[in-house]
Image (spheres, helix red, strand yellow):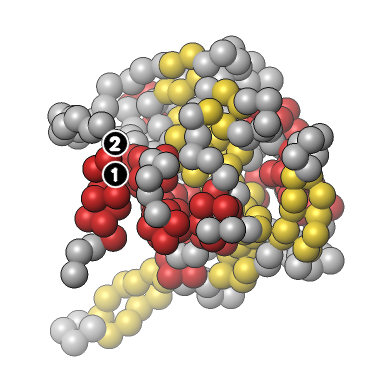
């Protein structure tokens, strides 16, 4: 029986494809500008940008400069690089992330494969987002051979996962299989097709969120930014700071990133790719269409 990856590749055969070279082990640093001068991508930690501009960072093998710019434990992977209160946006350069984004982009991808591809993309992005972030406990256990020091994820501090309905359900599908301890709270927001303003139709968030809770907000499309900003506002109203929140998305665009950067310092965003524009309908271009419609065939 063919794997999901094989089926996805077969679904894409109708589109013109070309073979690319194997990716090098460590990609060279580069910067790319978008129409919005405030947005740029770098494979290394750059010098601090103006506070109005989000710093976008690829996750590659850290350079010496990156390690020095990070916290004292950065070289051992104990902590994430310090953003100095600035928003960071990570675009992991893993080839599987690029693969699943490409499957999602293809208009010929059937709904069932689209939904599964969204879940697979979410798996890798959540894995990246949880790096150096999960609370752990240490101790000793007896192996069949000897006593060994061990480190486990602390189940007493579950990660709060907040998928934004309905497309967020597909992207967050594998969260509980990646993270050993989670609590999921659904949040439904609908965007008006004319005004592009969000309205809440489902709010399953608790009235008060415990201090120090880590929150993973999952929203596939960061386009105009109205929906994701409204969602984070609800969390902040319940006691969460932006530094406790990580956002996972399939595709992001400069308008949303600029709004997030202006309002939520210290926020971290993990996305599969960044596209350069949003059209008059509020759709990311080239994007991947309506993620909810394509995931659930409605």
Whether pointer 1 and pointer 2 mark residues with C-beta atoms closer than 8 Å, the reply is yes
Q: Cα distance, mark 1 to mark 2?
A: 6 Å
Q: How far across and down, in percent of the image, does residue 98 sit?
A: 34, 40
Compared to residue 291, the image places residue 70 above or below, namely above
Q: Residues within 10 Å of mark 1 (few under 14, many from 20)?
A: many
Q: Nearer the viewer, residue 13 or 236?
A: 13
Q: Residues within 10 Å of mark 2 (few under 14, many from 20)?
A: few
Residue drawn at x 53%, y 58% is 297
Q: Nearer the viewer, residue 126 or 15?
A: 15
Residue drawn at x 42%, y 61% is 112
Res 185 → quadrant: bottom right
Secondary structure of residue under mark 1: helix
Res 226 → quadrant: top right
- Residue occupied by mark 1: 12
Q: How far across and down, in percent of the image, does residue 211 sit?
A: 74, 61
Compared to residue 219, the image places residue 113 above or below, namely below
For residue 97, side relative to residue 179 (left or right): left
State the quadrant of the N terminus: bottom left
Residue drawn at x 74%, y 53% is 189
- Residue occupied by mark 2: 15
Q: How far across and down, in percent of the image, does residue 176 sit?
A: 49, 70
């Amino acid at each position: 029986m063919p794997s999901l990856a094989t089926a996805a590749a077969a679904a894409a055969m109708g589109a013109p494809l070309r073979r690319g070279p194997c990716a090098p082990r460590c990609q060279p640093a580069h910067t790319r500008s978008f129409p919005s001068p405030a947005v740029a991508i770098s494979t290394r930690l750059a010098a601090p940008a103006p506070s109005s501009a989000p710093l976008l960072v690829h996750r590659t093998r850290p350079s010496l400069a990156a390690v020095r710019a990070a916290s004292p434990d950065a070289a051992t992977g104990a902590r994430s690089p310090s953003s100095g209160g600035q928003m960071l946006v990570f675009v992991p350069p893993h080839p599987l992330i690029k693969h699943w984004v490409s499957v999602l982009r293809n208009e010929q991808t059937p709904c069932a494969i689209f939904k599964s591809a969204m879940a697979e993309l979410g798996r890798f992005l959540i894995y990246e987002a949880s790096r150096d972030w999960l609370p752990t406990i240490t101790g000793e256990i007896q192996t069949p051979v000897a006593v060994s020091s061990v480190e486990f994820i602390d189940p007493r501090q579950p990660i709060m996962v907040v998928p934004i309905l309905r497309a967020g359900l597909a992207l967050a599908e594998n969260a509980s299989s990646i993270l050993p301890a989670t609590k999921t709270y659904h949040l439904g927001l609908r965007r008006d097709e004319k005004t592009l303003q969000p309205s809440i139709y489902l709010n399953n968030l608790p009235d008060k969120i415990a201090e120090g809770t880590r929150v993973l907000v999952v929203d596939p499309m960061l386009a105009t930014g109205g929906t994701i900003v409204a969602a984070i506002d609800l969390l902040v109203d319940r006691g969460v700071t932006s530094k406790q929140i990580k956002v996972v998305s399939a595709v992001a665009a400069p308008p949303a990133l600029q709004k997030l950067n202006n309002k939520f310092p210290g926020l971290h965003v993990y996305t599969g790719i960044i596209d350069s524009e949003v059209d008059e309908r509020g759709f990311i271009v080239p994007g991947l269409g309506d993620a909810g419609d394509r995931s659930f065939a409605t």
